[in-house]
Image (cartoon, coloured by chain):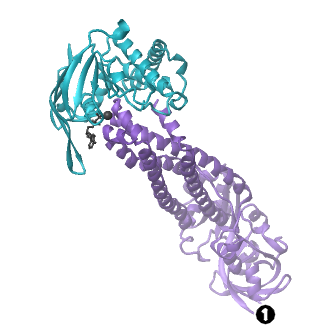
Chain colours: A purple, B cyan
Amino acid sequence: MLWKIAWRNLWRNKRRSVIILVSVVVGMVAMMLTDALYTGMIRQVLTNQVSLEVGHIQIHRKGFHDNPSIKLLIERPDEVEAVIRQHPEVLHHARRVLTYGILSSSYNSSGVNIVSVEPEAERQITLISKSIVQGRYLKGEAHEVLIGEGLARKLEVSLGDKVVAMASRLDGSIGSDVFRIVGIYRTFDSEHDKVTMYIPLETAQHMLGLGDAVSEFVLMVKDVRQVDAVRDSLRNQLPPIYETLSYRDVLPLLVYQSEAMAQWMMIYYVIIGIALVFGIVNTMLMAVFERMQEIGVLKAIGMPNRKVLAMILLESTILGLLGTVIGIGVGMLIYWPLSHSGLNLSVFSESLASFGVGAVIYPVMDLRILLSAGVSIPIVALVGAIYPAIKAVRFEPVEAMRYI
Amino acid sequence: MEIIRTEKLEKVYQDNSVPVHALKGIDLSISAGEFTVIAGPSGSGKTTLLNLIGALDKPTAGKVYLEGEDLSAKSKGQLANIRLNKIGFIFQAYNLIPVLTALENIEFTMMLRGIPEKERRRRALALMEELGIAELANKRPTEMSGGQQQRVAVARAIVNDPTIVLADEPTANLDSVTGSRLLDLMERMNREHNITFVFSSHDPKVIERGRRLLWLRDGLIEKEDVRDAAPSEG
Ligand SMILES: Nc1ncnc2c1ncn2[C@@H]1O[C@H](COP(=O)(O)OP(=O)(O)O)[C@@H](O)[C@H]1O
Ligand SMILES: [Mg+2]
């Protein structure tokens, strides 16, 4: 019956209840969508990095991750590949040679990351084969090179031009080779595109005097949630001269960022929550003082204080629950299309691109967000009603009833 | 059997720090089954006296005993409990809970006492039937006339079988015919169920319906009359 009274009281002043309900819903939807947008953005940065170069799992000679020197090599790649091939959870893998060097055109030169790949295997791992804007992807022919749009601009070269790459060979001398630009690519990460060139693996092995040796194996697993387990089992099967790392180990900053983000969002929730608390306090105070005489009568006929308290708190909590349900509904209605179409932030795309996100952000609504919003609003409503409820409890029945 | 006794009851209000002596030493005793009216002009202290007897307010001096228990020794929570279980109230302005229907208003105090829903519904409906207000069951106070609301208020006051029902000017907001019918109803409940009523009025037509008359003036009982028989018996 207290529920019934609280519910009906809520609708006595419809306009007031609707106004506070709307502000609860707006606050809640703002919280949910901002959170979803940031969550989506961080995830996108992470998946972008994974799909641009990192892959799910990397295997190197021990120490390579901390000091990526051309001297730290996997000298017997077939031995490692045999272990990878028999692992049921590994979907794709590819070999790479990674080093630094200088790329020069007739006009200019630039420091570069030289990424040497098995063209066909690499297709399965990274997006580079899908990022060609001019020319074609690598075929595995000698002397072909793929450069980023930013790098092409810097070197003032275009498709079909010749460029010269120089890098340290394993024996310490300088290796160099002439390449023809067969393709120009563009990814969402403009910084990456200014400094990265792709050549076939064998060309690099020859130019650097590596024989069969490679710098790393990059792997994609079937189920990304199992990535740590796969890493551990590979690590156990491989000789200890190798290091096996998941993308979480390779990109600790991004992983940390996504965790820190959740904490930042909590602060944001608290701020919106405090604003809503004041709205609720105000509304409930009005509701209580407006019904002073009535509350006096309830107390006169023997309603105990704790029930008066419960009645007021219930009224506000119902408001909060109602706001939560509507808020989640409205939030999902806005979120659903956005999660498919993405939010186009091309206005900020330059800064986003250098941060490693595309111009289109796909918000991600997860259980954490729904729970934070779904639990915090009813609590806010309850907290906001405490002071008004105490006021109601303090009314003396005789005094309150004189207010006619 | 005596159910109410007051001893040298005094109440002083502070009205803008001017003391107002509303009651100046009331000694009275009320026994079970009485149909008593506290009669007196406006400002004579009727409401103050009923509030003290009804455990709604505390006296400045003197004592109120309800069934031998000293009310001044009780906490606020205990007083609320006494009001809930032992006292029925009928107010001048009806004061039903506006968001509840007539039936729910009558059930309300039973709900507070923890009576199960089925039981309280049954009792409320039976009482409404007896009081001839069954057709009002699903009406909200705003949908009822003053007389109808006050009948529902009577039902609410007596449904818990209180020791005493206190009614402060119950007919003051009603026209004389409706007021007279309400008194008929209260009288019948008094006669048939031996419910003790104490009501107040300044209206001679209402006062003459009391069987025992306590005349209040300036915070003192001026005189007391007892009528032999209620008119409805004649
Ligand atoms: N809360 C109060 N504060 C100050 N004076 C009051 C208060 N309540 C009643 N009084 C005064 O006490 C006297 C008795 O009032 P009351 O008991 O209401 O009389 P009645 O019900 O017979 O009209 C009046 O003079 C009234 O003005
Ligand atoms: Mg009065």
Q: Is residue A403 above or below residue B6?
A: below
- Quarter of the rendering occupied by the C terminus of chain A: top left
Residue plotted at (41% across, 16% down): B185
Q: Is residue B166 left or right of residue A364?
A: left
Q: Quadrant of residue A232?
A: bottom right
The residue lying toward the viewer, choosing from A386 and A292, is A292
Q: Is residue A67 visible?
A: yes
**Image x and y of residue B84, in percent:** 32, 26
Position of residue A354 relative to residue B68, above or below, is below
Q: Quadrant of ligand 2?
A: top left
User: What's the residue at 64%, 80% (across, down)?
Assistant: A170
Q: Which residue position holds label 1?
A: A106
Quarter occupied by residue A312: top left
* Chain designation of label 1: A
Query: In the current view of this chain or complex, which residue is farthest to the bottom?
Result: A107
Left or right for B158, reference A12: left
Q: Nearer the viewer, residue A267 or B26?
A: B26
Image coordinates for residue B104, horizontal then vertical, percent: 48, 25
Of residues A49 and B89, the one nearer the viewer is: B89
Establish if A229 lies above or below A94: above
Give the side of residue A159 with respect to residue B165, left or right: right
Q: Secondary structure at mark 1?
A: loop
Neighbor class of circle 1 (other Cα within 10 Å; few <14, some 14-19, many 20+) is: few
The image position of residue B136, as x and y in percent, is: 53, 21
Three-letter code for the amino acid on which mark 1 is drawn: Ser
| Residue occupying the far front of the picture | B204
